[in-house]
C-alpha cells in the first residue's frame, strides 16, 4: 500500500483534533511533519495541542515544529470563543512526553521537502501564514510539493463576516500569496464543510466507540460551532477528500483574496471568466454528507485503545 507523504499545518482547535486523530491512525498517511500556526488559539497553545495529540496516539515518531505567532500584516484575532481558551478543552491528556523540533516550521518544511525522495502533499487547515512564508522565503522547494489541500475560503458566505471564512480572514495576505503561488491547490471551504455535518446521533455513537471517541466528544461539548442539523468537522474534510475525492464535486476557478476593506478575507471566484482565462484553485462545492458521516464514524471507531495513552474526561 502506497502511503501519501504529508506535511500537516494546523491550529488545534477541536475540529483539528478530530482530523489529527484520523491523520495519526490511518495507514494511508505517512506524516512527515506537523507544524503549528496561530489561529484558533495562540501558537503556543496550538503547538501544545499538537503535542498532546501526538502523545495520546503514542506517536513519538512525529516531527512537530512551531510556526508563525501572528499573521503577516493583519492583527491576530483568535477563535477561543468557539474552541475554548486552550483550544482543546474537556479532556486531560496527562503528562505529555512529546517535544518539538529545534527548527522553525518553515525550516522544518524545507528540510522535509528537500530530503524526500518523492513529492509531498501539504495539507493546511489553519491560517496560511507558514505556507506563505515557505513560498516567499524558499521558492526553490515549491517543485517538491505534489499539491496543497487547504481548509479555508468560501464562495457562498463566511463565518467571520458575511463573506469571510475564518482561516482566510485570520491572514488574508498569506492566503493571497498562497493562491497566487502556482501550486496545485484544492480549496475545501465552507461551501462543503457546512454541509458535511455530524449529527447528535453520530456524536453519541462516537462517545461509546472507544477512548478516542470519548476524547473527541468531551471536547465537542465545548465546541461553539453549531449548525441546525449538526456540528461541522471542517478540517476533517481535507483528509476525507484525499481518501475519497469521488465524494466531492469540484469546479476550477480563478480565486482572488480580498486583503483590506469591509470584505477583508473574502474569497472571490471569477465565475464568469471576466478577468482570467485560467484557474488557480480547484474549489469544492458539493459533498456526499451521508458518506462523510459514515466514514468519520468508521475512521474513529477503528482506533484501538491499545494504540493510545489514555487520559481522562475533565469534569
Image (tube, grey):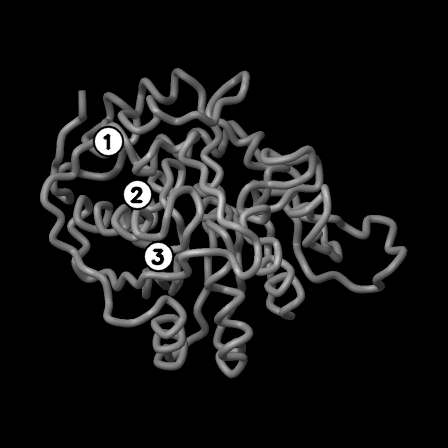
Question: Label 2, label 3: how many angstroms apart (C-alpha)?
Answer: 12 Å
Pointers 1 and 2 in contact (C-beta within 8 Å)? yes
Looking at the image, residue 290 lies above or below residue 61: above
- Name the residue rendered at 53%, 61% in the picture: 72
Residue where numbered disc 3 is placed: 29
Q: Which mark is residue 215?
A: 1
| Quadrant in the picture for residue 299 | top left
Quick one: label 3, few (<14), some, or many (20+) residues within 10 Å?
some
Looking at the image, residue 135 lies above or below residue 252: below
- Which SS class for mark 1? helix
- Which SS class for mark 3? strand
The location of residue 165, given as percent across then percent down, is 60, 41
Quick one: label 2, few (<14), some, or many (20+) residues within 10 Å?
many
In the image, taking residue 21 as reference, residue 238 lies left or right, namely right
The location of residue 297, given as percent across then percent down, is 36, 30
Nearest to N terminus: mark 1 or mark 3: 3
- Considering every residue shown, the one lying at the far right of the view is 274
Q: Which mark is residue 21?
A: 2
The image quadrant where one finds the C terminus is: top left
- Which SS class for mark 2? helix
Quick one: label 1, few (<14), some, or many (20+) residues within 10 Å?
many
Question: Label 1, label 3: how many angstroms apart (C-alpha)?
Answer: 22 Å
Question: Label 1, label 2: how many angstroms apart (C-alpha)?
Answer: 10 Å
- Name the residue rendered at 90%, 56% in the picture: 274
Q: Nearer the viewer, residue 240 or 17?
A: 17
Pointers 2 and 3 in contact (C-beta within 8 Å)? no
- Name the residue rendered at 26%, 22% in the picture: 207
Amino acid at each position: 500500500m502506497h502511503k501519501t507523504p504529508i506535511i500537516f499545518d494546523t491550529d488545534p482547535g477541536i475540529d483539528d483534533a478530530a482530523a489529527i486523530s484520523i491523520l495519526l491512525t490511518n495507514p494511508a498517511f505517512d506524516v512527515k511533519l506537523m507544524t503549528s500556526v496561530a489561529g484558533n488559539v495562540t501558537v503556543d497553545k496550538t503547538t501544545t495541542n499538537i503535542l498532546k495529540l501526538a502523545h495520546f496516539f503514542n506517536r513519538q515518531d512525529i516531527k512537530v515544529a512551531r510556526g508563525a505567532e501572528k499573521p503577516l500584516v493583519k492583527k491576530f484575532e483568535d477563535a477561543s470563543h468557539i474552541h475554548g481558551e486552550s483550544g482543546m478543552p474537556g479532556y486531560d491528556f496527562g503528562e505529555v512526553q512529546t517535544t518539538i523540533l529545534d527548527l522553525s516550521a518553515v525550516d522544518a518544511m524545507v528540510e522535509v521537502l528537500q530530503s524526500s525522495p518523492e513529492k509531498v502533499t501539504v495539507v493546511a487547515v489553519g491560517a496560511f501564514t507558514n505556507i506563505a512564508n515557505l513560498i516567499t522565503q524558499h521558492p526553490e522547494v515549491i517543485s517538491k510539493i505534489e499539491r496543497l489541500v487547504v481548509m479555508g475560503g468560501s464562495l457562498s458566505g463566511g463565518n467571520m463576516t458575511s463573506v469571510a471564512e475564518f482561516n482566510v480572514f485570520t491572514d488574508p495576505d498569506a492566503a493571497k500569496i498562497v493562491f497566487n503561488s502556482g501550486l496545485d491547490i484544492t480549496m475545501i471551504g465552507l461551501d462543503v464543510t457546512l454541509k458535511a455535518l455530524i449529527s447528535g446521533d453520530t456524536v453519541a455513537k462516537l462517545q461509546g466507540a472507544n477512548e478516542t471517541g470519548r476524547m473527541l466528544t468531551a471536547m465537542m461539548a465545548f465546541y461553539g460551532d453549531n449548525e441546525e442539523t449538526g456540528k461541522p468537522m471542517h478540517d476533517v474534510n481535507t483528509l476525507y477528500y484525499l481518501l475519497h475525492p469521488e465524494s466531492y464535486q469540484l469546479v476550477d476557478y480563478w480565486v482572488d483574496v480580498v486583503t483590506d476593506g469591509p470584505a477583508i478575507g473574502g474569497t472571490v471566484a471569477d465565475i464568469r471568466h471576466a478577468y482570467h482565462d485560467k484557474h488557480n484553485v480547484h474549489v469544492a462545492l458539493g459533498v456526499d454528507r451521508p458518506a462523510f458521516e459514515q466514514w468519520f464514524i468508521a475512521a474513529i471507531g477503528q482506533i484501538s485503545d491499545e494504540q493510545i495513552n489514555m487520559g481522562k474526561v475533565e469534569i
